[in-house]
Amino acid sequence: VQLVESGGGLVQPGGSLRFSCVASGSILSITEMGWYRQAPGKQRELVATITTGGRTDYANSLKGQFTISRDNAKNTVYLQMNSLKPEDTAVYYCNARVFTSWASGPYRYWGQGTQVTVSS
């Protein structure tokens, strides 16, 4: 299973970015998909998750600023980030819980990470 992210980059404070992450490979089913981030010198932290049914969960500090969405048919999860601040600078990782067989799982897979830098 591979998760491929796209959409990172450099943005000015107050700007917006949109990420996408596509899961591919031997996938029977994906339960939860989400985004995490890791800033320099800090632990990886939750940004947002979304279930197959569309139930979302956000880090408290990011509610109203970020929006997660998902296209189940395309095994793709999106993250819309608005009103970006320098403290949002981090490497953002896509995550998915995947069944590759019905004998066990789901197992968690990670994308390679994409850098977001918020700076003027």
Image (cartoon, grey):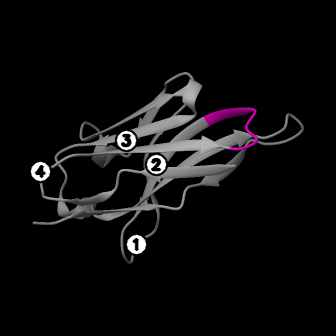
- Mark number displayed over residue 79: 3
Percent position (x, y) of residue 88?
27, 59
For badge 3, the amino acid type reads Leu
Q: Which residues are magenta?
A: 25-31
SS of the residue under disc 4: loop
Residue that badge 4 annotates = 14
In the rendered structure, are the residues bearing label 2 and label 3 in contact, judged by CB atoms less than 8 Å apart?
Answer: yes
Please say if 16 is above or below 45: above
User: Farthest residue toward the right?
Assistant: 103
Residue that badge 1 annotates = 42
Residue drawn at x 24%, y 41% is 65
Q: CA distance from mark 2 to mark 3?
A: 8 Å
Q: Earlier in the sequence, mark 4 or mark 2?
A: 4
Percent position (x, y) of residue 27?
73, 38
SS of the residue under disc 2: strand
Disc 2 residue crowd, few under 14, some 14–19, many 20+, Cα 10 Å? many
For badge 4, the amino acid type reads Gly
Q: Name the front one of labels 2 and 1.
A: 2
